[in-house]
Each structure stands twice: as structure tokens, then as C-alpha cells.
Amino acid sequence: MKSLVAVVPFAVVLVAIACGDGGQPMLVALDAGHGGEDTGATYPVDAGTDEALLFEKDLNLAVIQELASLLEADTDLRVVLTRETDEFILARERVDVALDKCESQFGRACDLYLSVHHNGFEESLVDGPQVLFDEESDILFATSLHDRLSSGLSFPPEACSYSYLYTDYGLTQEDFGLPVHEGLISATTEAYFFTNDCEADHHLSGAESFTVCDDTGGCRTVTLGPRVQDEATAIYDAVASWQDRSQDDAQGKNDYGQGCELHGAPPLVLVQC
Ligand SMILES: [Zn+2]
């Protein structure tokens, strides 16, 4: 769950690109936000753990599971997950967990780090996409994510019958409590507002079943809507698009001489490359 914050605007951004080493498959670290005792946002937003109908931690994990399946089918990509179950991991330790897994499983550092969250807000009519990034070198990836999420998901979701207020929250520069280091390209997605009545209704009336197990082996079934697949597909497309741009950049095909310009007033800040 994130609060909305003002964005520090800057006019011109130089873009640095990271790629898989020496033609090796790109290593993508996926982080399902929250987990265990940290539920993230709930629906209804003010419901306690016993009364909540939906937990952000479950939706994040469902999207990550779908996304990992799509990415692992791509021969140019390999995936590690910070968590595969309903377990608690400190936010500040998640990048280190990912880096350790890339090193132990593939013998080298991760190339890309993506954390999946969904926004929460006390006003249940609020909805819209947002992508957070930490450093200027993340902007191209963050822009690709924003473009694919805003065009790949319908706002509002189909069959919305509640009052609805859409805002494109664009890109926000904030580290989100995740200390990213070693030049790792990273971003955090907040594809939509989990606490929006239409978004929640989409999942509560859904028929997609996901099994969520905790670290003691206990499992439960979570029912969500097809928006999980739509979001995973949009993020997959964003990773593939960013990878293509990275490869073109390595071959000198991209011209970043003019940089990218941020335009619009916060909270709507979009990047034009
Ligand atoms: Zn969250």
C-alpha cells in the first residue's frame, strides 16, 4: 500500500541500460509485495484481518505467479522470486534475497528487479495506474511498464457499476523502502487501486482460483478475476519491450542523445523518450 506523493520533476534524463551478460539469458527478479503478517492493502480498506474480503499480498503473489510462467516460457529470460508463498520478508531485505538467488542459481547478478504492488486509498472510487522508480537509470523500464499497464488494462474494469474516478498517476520517483544497489535496474508497479469498489468487485465475482500456501505448509484458495492475467501479460510485454530497447542500445541503434523529457504536473508525470 502506498500513499500518493509529489514527484520531483526534472527536465532531461539520460538513460543507462543493463542487459544480460555476454548474450546470456536476462535474469529477472520478481517480488510479490507484502506477505505473511504484512497483508498490504485490504478490501474494504478499513477492515481488520478477520473481516477483510481481499488482501493485497494475495493479489501480488497471484500476478507474480502468472508473470513468472510467461517469462519462464521465454528462452531469453530466467526468473527468480523473492517469495513463492505467503511469507513475511522485510522490505529492506528483498533485493538482497533476489541477488542471493540469482547468484546461487545462476552464478551471477540479477539484471532486472520488479516489485508488484497494488495501491490502496481510503476513498474507494479512486483508481488508476502508477509506477515507481528509484534512479534515473530505471526510467526507461518504468516508462515501458507504465505504457503497457495503462494501455493493457481497461479503466474502469468491465461491468463497473460504482462511482468511479480515474487518474493516471504516471511515474513517481521514490525508493519505496527497497534499497536497490549494484546498478540493478528496478521499478515497482501499482497497476491499479486494490481498494477501488469496481476493482474489488471484479475479483470478488471472479472465477480464477489461486492456491496460496504459507511457510508452514498450510494452503488456502483465493478466487480472483481475469485482470490477474491481463496485468501479468501487460508486465510481460513491458519487460520484452524494455529488453528489445536494451539490445538495440547495445548495438547502438537507439539514439538517447535527446534524452527523455518529463512533462505534466504531479501527480500526472509521464516520460516521453
Ligand atoms: Zn503494497
Image (cartoon, rainbow, N blue to C red):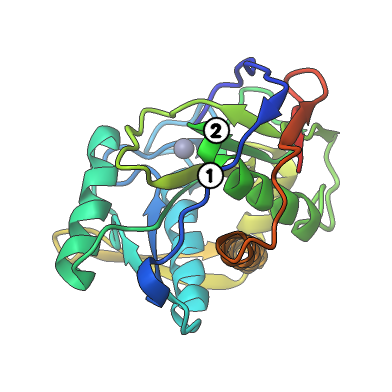
Which residue does the numbered mark 2 point to in the structure image?
136
Which residue does the numbered mark 1 point to in the structure image?
16
Q: Is residue 62 among what the camera can see? A: yes
The amino acid type of the residue labelled 1 equals Ala
Q: Position of residue 4 (x, y in %)?
A: 61, 21
Q: Nearer the viewer, residue 248 or 110?
A: 248
Residue plotted at (62% across, 69% down): 229
Q: Is residue 69 above or below residue 125?
A: below
Residue plotted at (67% across, 65% down): 230
Q: Position of residue 10 (x, y in %)?
A: 67, 19
Residue plotted at (80% across, 18% down): 265
Residue plotted at (46% across, 45% down): 186
Circle 1/circle 2 CB separation < 8 Å: yes
Q: Is residue 173 above or below residue 149?
A: above
Q: Position of residue 34 (x, y in %)?
A: 36, 42
Q: Is residue 1 above or below residue 184?
A: above
Q: Nearer the viewer, residue 190 or 178?
A: 178
